[in-house]
Image (spheres, grey):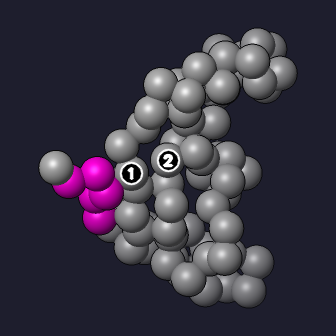
Amino acid sequence: MQTEFAFELPRGYVDGGGQVHREGVMRLSTARDELVPLRDDRVRENPASLSVVLLGRVVVRLGTLPEVHAGVIE
């Protein structure tokens, strides 16, 4: 069973150094991935941010970035 999926962003993410990151990999979410964001203060204050926090957990690579987190996804 395939658990990771490659994707390409049409415009990409531009990091602080001006480099554009388009290609990434995301994994299937787990029950924990879907439950942990419900305890996140950002999600409690604004339920619409659930998708951002969830994607921050399941995107495992984006270009050459050393770390992908909700701030990058946002």
Between 21 and 59, the one nearer to me in the picture: 59
Q: Main secondary structure of the magenta part?
A: strand
Identified at 72% across, 51% down, the residue is 71
Distance from Cα at disc 2 to Cα at disc 1: 5 Å
Q: Earlier in the sequence, mark 2 or mark 1?
A: 1
The residue singled out by tag 1 in the image is 27
Three-letter residue code for mark 2: Val
Q: Is residue 36 above or below residue 2?
A: above
Q: Which residues are magenta?
A: 2-6
Q: Position of residue 48 (x, y in %)?
A: 60, 20
Give yes or no for residue 23 being in the magenta stretch: no
Residue 58 is marked as 2
Between 16 and 67, the one nearer to me in the picture: 67
Residue 10: in sight, yes or no? Answer: no
Residue placed furthest toward the left? 1
Identified at 67% across, 47% down, the residue is 70
